[in-house]
Image (cartoon, rainbow, N blue to C red):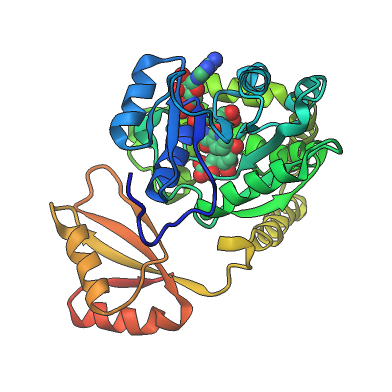
Amino acid sequence: MSRHPEFISRLDGPVLVIGTGLLGTSLGLALSRAGVEVYLYDISPTSQLLAQDMGAGRLWNGDLPQPALVVVAAPPDVVGELVIGALEQFPEATVTDVASVKSQIMKQVFAHPQAARYVGSHPMAGRESTGPTAADADLFVGRAWVLVKHPCTNPQAALQVLTLAQDVGAFVTELDAKTHDQAVALISHVPQLLSSILAGCLVNAPSTSLNLAGGGLRDMTRIASSDPRLWTAITTANAPAVVKVLKEIVASCTELIDGLAKAPVEPPTGVAQSAVHSVMLKGNQGVARIPGKHGEAAVHTAELGVLVPDAPGELGRLFNEVGAAGINIEDLRIEHSVGQRVGLAWLTVHQTKAVELSEYLESRNWQVIPA
Ligand SMILES: NC(=O)c1ccc[n+]([C@@H]2O[C@H](COP(=O)([O-])OP(=O)(O)OC[C@H]3O[C@@H](n4cnc5c(N)ncnc54)[C@H](O)[C@@H]3O)[C@@H](O)[C@H]2O)c1
Ligand SMILES: O=C(O)C(=O)C[C@]1(C(=O)O)C=C[C@@H](O)C=C1
């Protein structure tokens, strides 16, 4: 594949991707776009063919030159054995993986004599859909990518994996396996489980209730569509850290329930109000600590709501207008409820451009709602 001028890789290939689902195919697309030779292998013939059709690389066969780097992008419960298999099959190659949990895999791999060529890694980028067709060459752009080294890790191998992460647009952070697993329990694994538990409460809800769903519920449940098999493997492999965070949440829920249960008291005692208020306040403080893109504090953007008629081409027309104003859309979310004739598009733009865009869109007869 020819090199795309905007995305030239510093990494020397070929790279063999084992597991061509969402992560493996996204990586193949990003590397192929940057001119790196990518080979693809998946236990599922359909998945590897789809990945090849999408342009993520070519199917691996033993006649091809040996890979310089092998990336294992399979579910966490098979990663350890696949990494060891790759270390043995390709004695010159560096081997890495992208699994969401690290301690168990590090322990399994570092019992092997050739483990110095292995570097654990975890791109903090993904989505609720799996499989090659959900892949995106830009998946890793601006996202964190954790490198997990071992005292025996070969520095040259670590450098290769660092280069891989940087070449696909990620910024690299180094952590030990235990710190990594505790961190992702809090910021990824428990959020997934809570989203699933909340969405699970909707299973028997009447459709008259569900038809009222707005942005709040949608924001909280996007990841509830994630793959049950993959997430069972992820969370069980990180059970101790996940249980610790879940227990904290149960304690907070119990406190809140006890406080709220006192709400109907006459005259009001303020206990219920204080229980809810402290939950809300702590939440405000926590959410303000989540960094924005590239790990910077998210203070430079503003959101603008625009009412968009529910008709073909209207969203495209809005984007064209914003483009004509010379303003970049940093992010986008859409609120849309069943039976409504309009949707609400929330555009995130640079803070300094928000007023200008609002005035411009109003002058073009769009109805703008400030955040
Ligand atoms: N989905 C996410 O958001 C996300 C984000 C970061 C990291 N990860 C990690 O990336 C890895 C892959 O996740 P995904 O979302 O791409 O899943 P996926 O289901 O889309 O892809 C996994 C692929 O691995 C293949 N596979 C399974 N066993 C195999 C084997 N023995 N040999 C070869 N291929 C095999 C499957 O056929 C499948 O195509 C997981 O370890 C996951 O923890 C996922
Ligand atoms: O769905 C998303 O937006 C994600 O980025 C998925 C997400 C996450 O929880 O942040 C999920 C699992 C990973 O191991 C890494 C990323």
- Residue drawn where x is 58% and y is 49% of the image: 165
Q: Quadrant of residue 102?
A: top right
Q: Quadrant of residue 256?
A: top right
- Placement of 288 over or under 361, stated as above or below: above
Q: Does residue 70 appear anywhere in the picture?
A: yes
Displayed-image quarter of ligand 2: top right
Q: Would residue 335 appear left or right of 92 to someone viewing this image?
A: left
* Residue 139 spot, x, y in % from top left: 46, 47
Which residue, as the protein is rendered here, is positioned at the far right?
Answer: 151
- Residue drawn where x is 31% and y is 58% of the image: 344
* Residue 108 spot, x, y in % from top left: 77, 20
Q: Nearer the viewer, residue 236 or 209?
A: 236
Q: Nearer the viewer, residue 77 or 228?
A: 77
* Residue 128 spot, x, y in % from top left: 46, 35
- Placement of 285 over or under 327, stated as above or below: above
Q: Does residue 264 appear anywhere in the picture?
A: no
Instruction: Give the quarter of the figure containing the N terminus.
Output: top left
* Residue 32 spot, x, y in % from top left: 40, 43
Q: Nearer the viewer, residue 90 or 336?
A: 90
- Residue drawn where x is 26% and y is 82% of the image: 360
Instruction: Give the quarter of the figure containing the C terminus.
Output: bottom left
What is the total number of numbered labels drawn onto the structure image? 0
Q: Would residue 326 appear left or right of 330 to someone viewing this image?
A: left
- Residue drawn where x is 28% and y is 31% of the image: 53
